[in-house]
Amino acid sequence: MSGVPLRYAARILAGQSPDSGAVELLDEGLPFLQGNAEFGAQHPTARWESASAPKVAEAGDVLVSVRAPVGAVNLADQRYGIGRGLCAIRPHTGPSRYFYWWLLSSAEELNSVATGSTFAAVSASDLAALLVPVADETQQAQIADYLDRETAEIDAFIADQEELIGLLIERQDSTWQAAIDGMAAPEVPLRRTIDSIVDGPFGSSLTSAHYSDHGARVVRLGNIGVNAFKEEDEAYISMTYFAELQSHAVERGDVVIAGLGDERMPLGRAAVIPELGPALVKADCYRLRPNRLMTAEFLAWVLSAPQTRGRFGELSRGSTRQRLNTSIVGDVMVPLPSISEQQRVVLQTSEQMRELDAAIADAREAIALSKERRAALISAAVTGKIDVRGTA
């Protein structure tokens, strides 16, 4: 298909922010959207209102994020005041849903022209220059109907896989909990089971500016999985600088614990350090060196268990972002069974966990492939590479 600049196919309304005092929490006034933070799967959910919003999108307008993440798209389901982070696209003719799908497929092109060293952004002029594939209203409606239908099936499959992942994680947690609940062992503060605990270098003492192509390995938060060390995301510093940071060194058999976390990678997760050669921990990664009372494998296992992670969450409350420190880690209570019982429980649960981990990985791969297929389908449909006539 050939194309025409968007400026000839639609009105482009650049958002504008009202005075700060004119924006309030949403009640019964005109909903106001600051930017893409209020975007949903297809329609936004406003948190604010403004009676004096200078720019207003109408129901049916396509809302495009012009600030990071550039190219996010929603459909306005009612009138909204729009801030500087958004533009509203109002087609002169044809269904808005077609323009919605086309703009979704244009996100990569928009990002290629985005400017800004800290926060990427595009202008209304950048949007106006995008080429809209030429199609009559009938074709546009057919393409929109086709994509509504096909993407709904893909989205349903993705939702099923996400639900499956949630169930598998619940099963992992219940397996962990049952194993710990079944132990007749006293609980002790973690500090009794370790010889030492060390944090990574503070602040500017170790940043990405110190990284080199080879040398001593830097263990970062991304390397700490849930009872698993992740080999990807490798970083190194020179051996010369490593010599200055020896107090933060780690070696095979140490345990590392994550001092920061989120919903996907929880606070307090831990892993046993494999053979890495010379290595050290970065800030917010704590190195634990177990003593004779506890094996490294059991220590990482029990720290990664949902009960312990839950305790870490409770102990870290009160800060803006959940964060541990060495005192909190040392204070957390952990079970202390015999060494033989530690070895037994880790061996007994490891195979179950591996099977569940494999199933979770398969579901995540299926989601990633489905999202790729969805994006390719949208692009092919709006550019005419797929003939959608007669597909209803």
Image (spheres, rainbow, N blue to C red):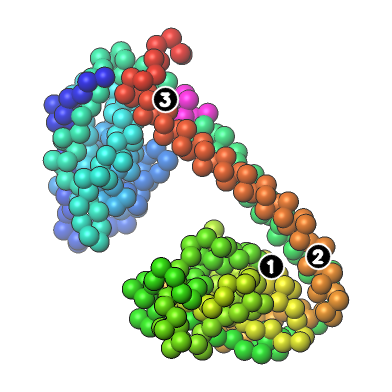
Residue 330 - label: none
Q: Which residue is mark 1?
A: 305
Residue 347 - label: 2
Marks 1 and 3, the one that precedes in the sequence: 3
Left or right position of 106 against 302: left
Q: CA distance from mark 2 to mark 3?
A: 49 Å
Marks 2 and 3, the one that precedes in the sequence: 3
Residue extent of the magenta highlight: 147-153
Q: Residue at x 29, y 22 (%)?
A: 95
Q: Is residue 139 above or below residue 221?
A: above
Where residue 115 appears, as percent x and y from the top left, is 20, 52
Residue 147 - label: 3
Is any atom of residue 294 visible in this view? Answer: yes
Q: Along the line of sight, which residue is nearer the eye, 84 or 388?
A: 388
Left or right position of 283 against 113: right
Three-letter residue code for mark 3: Leu
Rendered image quadrant of residue 22: bottom left
Rendered image quadrant of residue 93: top left
Where residue 77 appears, as percent x and y from the top left, is 33, 35
Left or right position of 336 against 106: right
Q: CA distance from mark 2 to mark 1?
A: 15 Å
Rendered image quadrant of residue 308: bottom right
**Secondary structure state at the residue bearing disc 1:** loop
> Quick check: is 148 in the magenta stretch?
yes
**Secondary structure state at the residue bearing disc 2:** helix
Neighbour tally class for label 3: few under 14, some 14-19, many 20 plus, Cα within 10 Å: many
> Quick check: is 60 in the magenta stretch?
no
Where residue 137 appears, as percent x and y from the top left, is 27, 15
